[in-house]
Amino acid sequence: MYSKTLPAGIDKILWSETKIQRRVCELAAEIEQDYLKSISNKHPRYQPIVAIGILKGAFIFLADLIRAISVPVEPDFVRVSSYSMGVNPGQLHFVHDAKTSLKERHVLIVEDIVDTGLTLSFLANEFKKRGAASIKFCALIDKTCRREKEVQLDYVGFHYSGDAFLVGYGLDYEEMYRNLIYIATLSPSAIQSSS
Ligand code: 5GP
């Protein structure tokens, strides 16, 4: 249940808790079916899917998603950031890297929201170099208006063509709002007043 008044800075709820939970279960069912077709747990070299969540935004989505998948899944996390200065400004690097060896593993990259696509394309290149058997992308939200790198998303929760800043269900604005149970737009005035 939501209180009638939204928290300060929140404009409009886009997806309620119920809608999110329903969509997460649908995605989990799709993922499970696809993996059951391509990898069998009777195969002698069978290993669980490695689901890699991108911190911090994907932590709630990953937790809900993998609990709705009934085939074995091994969770891990990465955190990436871009250099603001120095020799390669804007270039992405790992702040925290996955601990799991990805060689010959089926990797599912789990992202909260895809915006420019630079993060996913960086991770796909890195994980290919490590010899992953397959790499698939699962994004809760596909926000298309600022896309720079074309990325083929295998599983998408919600499509968003607007240009508002979204918060809730793991998504933050300056570390706030991650614990909202829904996903909402942040009012432009909330962004202006903090900058
Ligand atoms: P990109 O696809 O641009 O490389 O990066 C996506 C990342 O940018 C997301 O994981 C998230 O951290 C951040 N991001 C992009 N758009 C939004 C948004 O609307 N709200 C929030 N909270 N984060 C966003």
Image (spheres, helix red, strand yellow):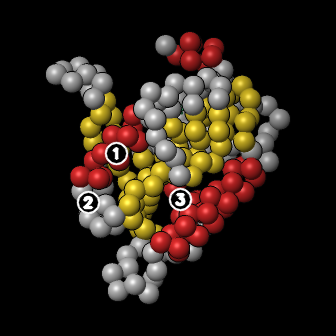
Asked whether, in this view, residue 179 is left or right of residue 73, the answer is right
Residue 175 appears in the figure: no
Q: In this view, does 126 lie above or below 175?
A: below
The residue located at (25%, 22%) in the rendering is 89
Closer to viewer: mark 3 or mark 2: 2
Q: How many badges with numbers are in the image?
A: 3
Q: Which amino acid does label 1 sit on?
A: Leu
Tell me the mark number nearer the camera, choosing from 2 and 1: 2
Label annotation for residue 53? none
Picture coordinates of residue 1, whole percent (x, y): 79, 48
Q: In this view, does 52 lie to the left or right of 22?
A: left
In terms of sequence position, does the residue under pointer 2 or pointer 1 come before the other? 1
Query: Residue 123 shows which numbered tag?
Result: 1
The crowd level at tag 2 (other Cα within 10 Å; few <14, some 14-19, many 20+) is: some
64 vs 103, left or right, is right
Q: Which mark identifies residue 63?
A: 3
Q: Mark 2 points at which residue?
A: 131
- Pointers 3 and 1 in contact (CB under 8 A)? no
**Sequence-wise, which precedes: disc 3 or disc 1?**
3
Report how far apart the C-alphas of labels 2 and 1 lie in the structure.
Answer: 13 Å
Where in the figure is residue 173, as x and y percent of width and height? 53, 29
Q: Does the residue labelled 1 lie within 8 Å of ligand 1?
A: no
Residue located at (63% from left, 14% from top) = 189
The residue under the point 49% across, 28% down is 147
Residue 124 at x, y = what percent? 35, 47
Secondary element under disc 3, as helix, strand or loop, is helix
